[in-house]
Amino acid sequence: MRRPLSRVNRRRFLQRSAVALTACSILPGRSRAQERKARLKFGVLGINHEHIFRMVEAVREGGGELAMIFADKPDPNHGAKFLRENPDVRRAREERELLEATDIALVISAARPAERAQTGIRVMRAGKDFLADKGGFLNLEDLTEARRVQAETKRIFSISYNERLLLPVSVKIDELLQAGAIGKVTHMKGLGPHGLYGHGPREDWFWTRAGRGGILMDIGAHQADQFLYYVGAEGAEVVAATATNLENPDHPEFEDHGTVSWRGKAGTGEAVLSFYTGKQTTGFVLELTGTEGRMEIQKHARRITVTNRRGQKKEYRADAKLPCPFGPQLVDDILNRTETAMSQAHAFLASELAVRAQLMARK
């Protein structure tokens, strides 16, 4: 969750951003992250979503080296592409080979949603840290077990809530909030439209509850993460939730529209989620209301509009090459056993809110 930065911590944040900016400059064919000496080695276990590309690149930018891949049933589109783009990386013959590899410190997974939680539990029990694609959990039982195993092993179970963590506009939002642009955030509204086919053909599991859970567990996890981060985690709970199928009668278990609202000690939040039947969407929108003003963010356009209490507006545009510090911070946390990228409590609580919203919507 976001806390006001001291002057010293703000200076450190800006220094880290400057370092990351240098690291994210792309060289022909290979990034500088791949050229410099690796700080740690990591493996990939499961390739069933295109988020794997950004997750791996983030860790590479932090100094990680992809050293092993195990994918027994990769997505025929993105999974096959990922394997083609990493031809020199060792292929594990079975999951156990990756989990027992002594040189692997971190395992990244964009496996099918129903498999991510138990994969992470096995990874932690093998003594390695874990980064899962969102949503990380489809039920409270897996979440309870993951919390217990994490407490026992002291391993990291992180989740890539990439709508905040891996978009350059989020870095600019943080900079403005830390500068007091709208005061203390008291309400968040998120609009999360997604295109059903912009990612290419969907695998069969995508349309089922057993394979994917539901819209609030899936893309709703992004919104739960943002509510906790921008408004605050203390006392956070789901107030109301809905999920329905409006445009996909051929897939009766699928949900293409959902709403959720939260409240906590520091404020409130709401989100509207949708899957459009085409490729294009209206773009992600985030609205933050604070004690001193209001901020509206058009995420795909990287445009931020700040309105102060006097009604005066000022617009900002985030550089597309602005570095996202999540990867470098996660690598730091693995090496130093710290929580700079995301606290463990935050990772689990965002998932819990997403799961509880889904369960509430089904009642």
Image (cartoon, grey):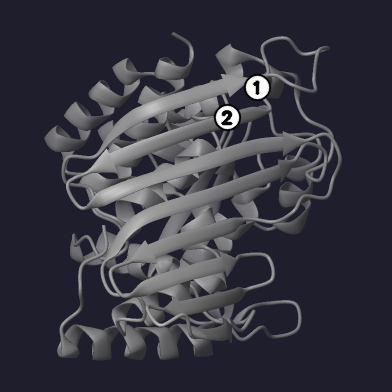
The N terminus is located in which quarter?
bottom left
Given the image, on which type of amino acid does mark 2 rest?
A: Gly
Q: Residue furthest front?
A: 310
Residue at left 59%, top 32%? Answer: 93
Q: Where in the figure is residue 104, as x and y percent of width and height?
A: 39, 51
Residue at left 28%, top 40%? Answer: 263
In the figure, is residue 298 to the left or right of 126?
right
Residue occupied by mark 1:
255
The C terminus is located in which quarter?
top left
Task: Name the quadrant containing residue 302.
Answer: bottom right
Q: CA distance from mark 1 to mark 2?
A: 7 Å
Given the image, on which type of amino acid does mark 1 rest?
A: Glu
In the figure, is residue 280 to the left or right of 192?
right
- Residue 42 seen in this snapshot: yes
Q: Where in the figure is residue 280, as x and y percent of width and height?
A: 83, 50
How many numbered circles does the render carry? Answer: 2
